[in-house]
Structures are given as structure tokens and as C-alpha cells.
Amino acid sequence: MNSKIDQQLDAWMPQALSIFRIVVGLMFLQHGLQKWFGIPVANPNFANIQLFSMVGIAGVLEIVCGTLVAVGLFTRPAAFIASGQMAYAYLIYTNRLARSFAPIANGGSLEVMYCFAFFILIFAGAGAWSLDATLRKKS
């Protein structure tokens, strides 16, 4: 049995999902932009980035998937790829589990949060304010 406040909040869920998706997409996009273009702030670790390197490919995926998720176009496939990338980054690339099981102790909280934020978008979709929703209405 839903209370009145639950009903009111449920009515806004598609819009809240869209805001969540936009923020997650833009946050992810900035990681790729930092790697490739030094935007919004340069990181000297990426000064000599190569396209066909692990970090180079990660940056491209972050730019492409972050943009697609932010605008809500092909959201589910883009979120699937981004979630997988973050799982790979946590489990394989940085080998966080060798340091500790807990993300707070091994420095992997960001990878885990991104992995599961994208994971929920695979199932929830893009929300009301998205290009996916616009294209669905036209067909």
C-alpha cells in the first residue's frame, strides 16, 4: 500500500532517473576528456597517452559511452559497455582485490560506484528526458 508521498515520488521517477543518468554520463565523460584533452584539468599521467593502450582505449570508451549516456541515446548498450569497463578496471587493470577486499581500503570506490550506476541504467533505461524516449515516441 503506497502512501500519498510514495505516489507523488513515483510520479517523478522517470524525470529523476533522467537527472541521475545525465549526471553519471557527464561525470564519466570528464574522465575521458581529462585523459585525451586535459579538460577540465590536466593530469600529467596522461601526457603521452597512446590510442592503442589500455588507458587510451579506456579514455575513448569514457568519451563515447559518457556522451551517449548523458544525452540518453543507446543508453542501455552504452551503460553495459561502461559497466563492464569499470568492472574490468576494478578487478583486472588496477587489481584492487590484491590490496584488500573492501573498496574503501583498496581505493576502488569510484570504479565500483560507476560499475553499479551503469548497471542499474542497463535495466532502468534512460528515463523520460532522453533521445531514446524521443525516438521511441516517433516510431
Image: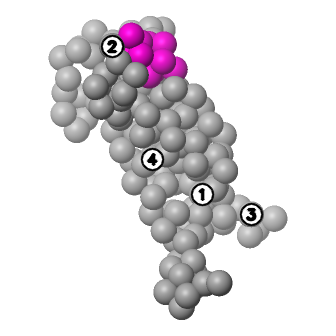
Q: Which residue is mark 4?
A: 25
Work out whether residue 13 or residue 44 is closer to the camera in this orientation and state it: 13
Distance Cα–Cα, label 4 vs label 1: 11 Å
Q: Can you name the residue that lies furthest to the bottom here?
A: 4
Residue 9 appears at what percent x and percent y? 51, 79
Work out whether residue 114 or residue 104 is closer to the camera in this orientation and state it: 104
Q: Residue at x 57, y 70 (%)?
A: 14
Residue 33 sits in quarter: top left
Question: Is 110 positioned to the left or the right of 124 in the image?
Answer: left
Q: Amino acid at mark 4?
A: Gly
Q: Which residues are magenta?
A: 88-98
Looking at the rendered structure, the secondary structure element under dot 3 is helix
Which one is earlier in the sequence, the residue at label 3 or at label 1?
1
Q: Amino acid at mark 2?
A: Arg
Looking at the rendered structure, the secondary structure element under dot 2 is loop
Q: Is residue 95 magenta?
A: yes
Q: Which residue is mark 1?
A: 126
How many neighbours does mark 3 have within 10 angstroms: few (below 14), some (14-19), or many (20 or more)?
Answer: few
Q: Amino acid at mark 3?
A: Arg
Camera-nearest label, 3 or 2: 2
Q: Which residue is mark 3?
A: 136
Way the structure is coloured: one colour
Which one is earlier in the sequence, the residue at label 1 or at label 2?
2
Work out whether residue 115 or residue 101 is closer to the camera in this orientation and state it: 101
How many neighbours does mark 4 have within 10 angstroms: few (below 14), some (14-19), or many (20 or more)?
Answer: many
Residue 54 appears at what percent x and percent y? 45, 11
Camera-nearest label, 4 or 3: 4
Instruction: Mark yes or no: residue 64 visible.
Output: no
